[in-house]
Amino acid sequence: MARCGGRVLLALCAALVAGGWLLAAEAQEPGAPAAGMRRRRRLQQEDGISFEYHRYPELREALVSVWLQCTAISRIYTVGRSFEGRELLVIELSDNPGIHEPGEPEFKYIGNMHGNEAVGRELLIFLAQYLCNEYQKGNETIVNLIHSTRIHIMPSLNPDGFEKAASQPGELKDWFVGRSNAQGIDLNRNFPDLDRIVYVNEKEGGPNNHLLKNLKKIVDQNAKLAPETKAVIHWIMDIPFVLSANLHGGDLVANYPYDETRSGTAHEYSSCPDDAIFQSLARAYSSFNPVMSNSNRTPCHKNDDDTSFVDGTTNGGAWYSVPGGMQDFNYLSSNCFEITVELSCEKFPPEETLSSYWEDNKNSLISYMEQIHRGVKGFVRDLQGNPIANATISVDGIDHDITSAKDGDYWRLLAPGNYKLTASAPGYLAITKKVAVPFKPAVSVDFELESFSERKEEEKEELMEWWKMMSETLNF
Amino acid sequence: MGFLWTGSWILVLVLNSGPIQAFPKPEVSQDKSLHNRELSAERPLNEQIAEAEADKIKKTYPPESKQNESNYSSIDNLNLLRAITEKEKLEEEKQSIRSSPFGNKLNVEDVDSTKNRKLNDEYDSTKSGLDYKFQDDPDGLHQLDGTPLTAEDIVHKIATRIYEENDRGVFDKIVSKLLNLGLITESQAHTLEDEVAEALQKLISKEANNYEEALDKPTSGTEYQAGKIPEKVIPVAAIQDGFTNRENDETVSNTLTLSNGLERRTNPHSEDDFEELQYFPNFYALLTSIDSGTLSNTKHQEKILPKSEKEAKEKETLITIMKTLIDFVKMMVKYGTISPEEGVSYLENLDEAIALQTKNKLENNSTDSKSKLYPVPSEKSHEETDSTKQEAAKMEKEYGTLKDSTKDDNSNLGGKTDGAKGKTEAYLEAIRKNIEWLKKHNKKGNKEDYDLSKMRDFINQQADAYVEKGILDKEEAKAIKRIYSSL
């Protein structure tokens, strides 16, 4: 009987608390918006996107808000910590966050690698919120994009630098303060220089892809690498990224590989094997940005040499040589194609201009992501249907091979044209196929590779057949 | 034929010796290994958070903690917590880390209201005490001496309360109000009544037995029963006379101390008010406004007496209700139904609700005597309500200035509160949009009604994972979990 009463009491208590909660919920609302409004939404606000600079706490909160709003399609994770201990946060958007679906290509945006180049950071925060909003509104383009791609957005690779730059008093931010990480390392000169290696291999022969050997020695045990650099390298090695862009400021152009000149001079067009598709990719960004693609605009700075700029795009080496950059590192250590986008003449423009930067860039940002669904894609499997990971896909006439991922899936970005694709793997017989590639969408081409042992077996069987026939004929 | 055979072998050889590159094998591992590696290679997150919190706490909380203990020693109803306070002294250092998130959270959740920061901090250590108690017991269902806390204990506590107030009518009032609110059914009310009556009987007989022992022991700090004895002496005596036939010696000695007891009885009572209800400034303002209402009514002497009686009763009832509510909440916390922070938030919100209601009533100048929060008798004139208003306004001002001065001291936290409110609001908005979309989305797919509990579990899981990885603060995670659990 006591038990019964106890339960009644519990129910009572629960009911009281519930009643209290309802009260609380009502009581809180009138007061709260006023306080919130005053501090955070001073400037223009549109659909949850507040066009103002986000320091580290606000950045985190903004990403958490996106996650809370779109839990079904988003996930926040961190690839590591900056020198001063700030998380290098990434928000992932996909129909199955946290999971690589076989055949689903992986995309990344990285911003604010130079801490004082702030526009990229903000644009990526806006983009995350925008994608979530549009997805929920049923925007077909966005819905399809999120269902068919795994999008990773890292608003800031150098949060320490940003804090330094943002803390500067006055309107005009310095051209240099906050650029490097907390150790004073320029992250975009800090990556292992694989350009040098590939240039040697071009001359003397050698691999044309995946040039980063001995990850442990060159990365983990390398004291010269910043923690941010190491984190990104591991990230690149872990996820089979296909397409990427690296957002900067200080100019207005979409820059593509190679960044480092072959001869070592200051300016020299240094094309990579995939020059054609890279030009197309860069244009896919710049053409949607009215200011960037305007060939008649005045250069950002008086004595700038922008002679290399074509339709808002430029080859890296042609503009100026950059050794140890992240863009080329992506191309030469992994399957990922990356370009560098310079978003603003002013590295840290006034907050009021952020909404107009968003307007100028949002279509470009979406368009660029869609480029991932181009060229050729498919699976490499054996005759039993098992995936062959790390198979090599080479394209006749392009001296750059890519490899298949864990599930045997591969994505080969190609400009429109006719190509011969060859898939090969150790212990297997290579297969070559002819493919006609349109501008878009991607063409699906699968490979079923026969292993040597299988072929041997086949041959043995053939031999036995022949022997049998012979013996029958000759009455052995 | 032989040619064919040889030919095919040659082909195989040729293909075999073709340019097969030695491709490197980039680390092909799951995404998750990235995070595990990161956590083990870099400084453990928990450690870092704990460090940061400990630093924060050491700067802001040390002055508060000493006050806490002295306050709690005088609250006789919270006897369970006395032992905890003892333990708290020992565990203070460890607790600072644990209590800070709760402390911060409280500050963070604080609306502008009339509560000042100090009070909240004191209340913090209650929570931290409770929390500590929790973390010792996995199921949180133990008394001081380690025996499990049963349903019986809860009934017992209510009976104790009624016993103290020495007014069975209190129980009736509480139950009738709950019935009015629709929180319990008739049958539940009856069952409750039986339970409490039974417990009350037991209590009376127990107290009578303990009285002998209690006379030897002066008020001690740790005994669960003994602490109540001084106050209970007189009620025990009074009720004993009515209920059981006890030794005359006791009765005689009881009556001797009767007069003292009466005085003492009122004092602890008001002390009680002051201590516990201090946490509810709005409620306190309400109480005092009732008093001041009486005071201002000096002109109409004849009417005063019945009024003051009535008002005193009302006041008693309100206090009892409040205390009972506090007790309920504490029991629920002990029982593990809600977490300490939830309990505190609930009580705070209740206080705010009282403030709101009070304001509304004042504004409306309502003569509705049935109003449970503002029992203004219908005879009250405009003049009186004005003066009551003034009193309430004065009270608010007092608290306002108190709050301001605290704010000056801790302008950082003040600003933080503001911004944090915006953040919570943003999160709330985001969650709302999410739920909306999920409901719509599920309807389209002709699925069952949206499974909120699954979502809740998922969110809880994710929130915890995020806290571990340093993506969410502990307070944020708790807030988010709370928001989801209240849907």
Image (tube, coloured by chain):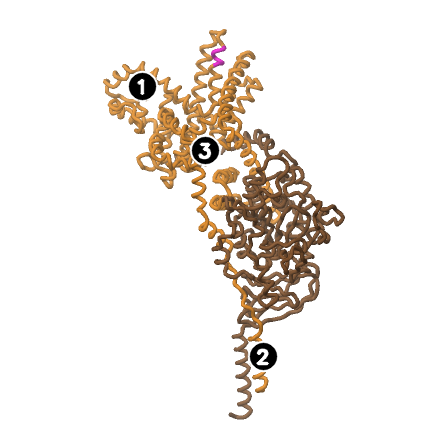
Chain colours: A brown, B orange
Q: Residues within 10 Å of mark 2 (few under 14, many from 20)?
A: few
Residue A72, above or below A168: below
Q: Quadrant of the N terminus of chain B?
A: bottom right
- Indicate left or right for B131 with B437 as reference: left
Cβ–Cβ under 8 Å for marks 1 and 3? no
Q: CA distance from mark 3 to mark 2?
A: 78 Å
Residue type at numbered disc 3: Gly
Q: Disc 2 marks which amino acid?
A: Leu
Determine if residue A136 is in view: no
**Do the numbered discs 1 and 2 sit on residues whose CB atoms are within 8 Å?**
no
- Reading the image, the residue beneath label 2 is B11
Residues rendered magenta in the picture: B292-296
Q: Nearer the viewer, mark 1 or mark 2?
A: 2
Q: Report if residue B202 lies within the magenta region.
A: no
Q: Callout 2: helix, strand or loop?
A: helix
Give me the disc on residue B103: 3
Query: Element under label 3?
Result: helix
Q: Are marks 1 and 2 on the same chain?
A: yes
